[in-house]
């Protein structure tokens, strides 16, 4: 862990001191930073300090999934990160890179990642939505939103429109499988493919159990 990773983590612990969101906690930030480091080793060319602080501040402003302002969350997080890092003495000439990486990481923001740090952070955060941890977070968030596990009469949406606000299982097709197919880096694509295959196996098992 770089010194800036440790400092950013400590500041986020203070910012989130009263937060209670199992899907967006320090464990999530630690895992994103771990994935960032793994991808960066293979991708090359990333500024480690920019990547570290972007990883730890990327969800600083966490709006609910069903909030009408959800698409603004990454920009708000980027703005907050710049304010916090300025006060912490982070290099001024690297703040724009941090801001862009954070703003572009979000699926809902629709901002194309233009730097290596932004591509790595986007992939690392999307990996959190895949595999076993992705399924755990998916069902947790669905519960928070009051969604059902699946449509008992049509779990695969063969005769209805997919609706992941009503049925958690629909989220696989609505967002998670497309996210796995849209990774930005070679390392991210390989990691995502493995996790997507596991999710497909889980869905098959689930369908078998519910008949």
Image (tube, rainbow, N blue to C red):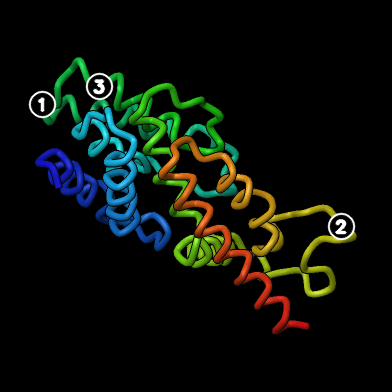
Helix, strand or loop at label 3? It is helix
Label number found at residue 89: 1
Q: Residue 191 in the image: state x and y as whole percent.
A: 45, 52
Q: At 32% from the left edge and 40% from the top edge, which residue is drawn?
A: 42
Pointer 3: what residue? 95
Camera sees residue 70: no
| 177 lies left or right of 154 | left
Q: Mark 3 or mark 1: which comes first in sequence?
A: 1
Q: Residue 136 in the image: state x and y as whole percent.
A: 49, 67
Disc 3: CA contacts within 10 A as few (<14), some (14-19) or many (>=20): many
Helix, strand or loop at label 2? It is loop
Pointer 2: what residue? 160
Viewer-closest of 197 and 203: 197
| 126 lies left or right of 47 | right
Camera sees residue 83: yes
Q: Residue 117 in the image: state x and y as whole percent.
A: 33, 30
């Amino acid at each position: 862990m770089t010194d800036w990773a440790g400092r950013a983590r400590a500041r986020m612990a203070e910012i989130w001191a009263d937060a209670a969101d199992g899907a967006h906690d320090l464990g999530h930030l630690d895992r994103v930073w771990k994935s960032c480091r793994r991808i960066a080793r293979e991708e090359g060319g990333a500024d480690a300090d920019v990547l570290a602080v972007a990883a730890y501040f990327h969800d600083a402003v966490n709006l609910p999934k069903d909030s009408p302002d959800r698409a603004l969350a990454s920009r708000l997080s980027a703005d907050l990160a710049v304010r916090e890092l300025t006060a912490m003495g982070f290099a001024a000439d690297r703040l724009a890179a941090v801001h862009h990486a954070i703003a572009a990481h979000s699926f809902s923001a629709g901002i194309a990642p233009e730097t290596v740090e932004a591509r790595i952070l986007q992939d690392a955060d999307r990996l959190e939505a895949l595999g076993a941890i992705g399924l755990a977070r998916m069902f947790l968030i669905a519960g928070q939103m009051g969604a059902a596990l699946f449509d008992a009469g049509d779990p695969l949406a063969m005769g209805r429109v997919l609706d992941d606000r009503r049925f958690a299982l629909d989220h696989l097709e609505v967002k998670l499988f497309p996210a796995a197919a849209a990774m930005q880096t070679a390392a991210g694509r390989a990691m995502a493919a493995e996790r997507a295959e596991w999710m497909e196996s889980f869905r098959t098992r689930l369908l078998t159990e519910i008949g």
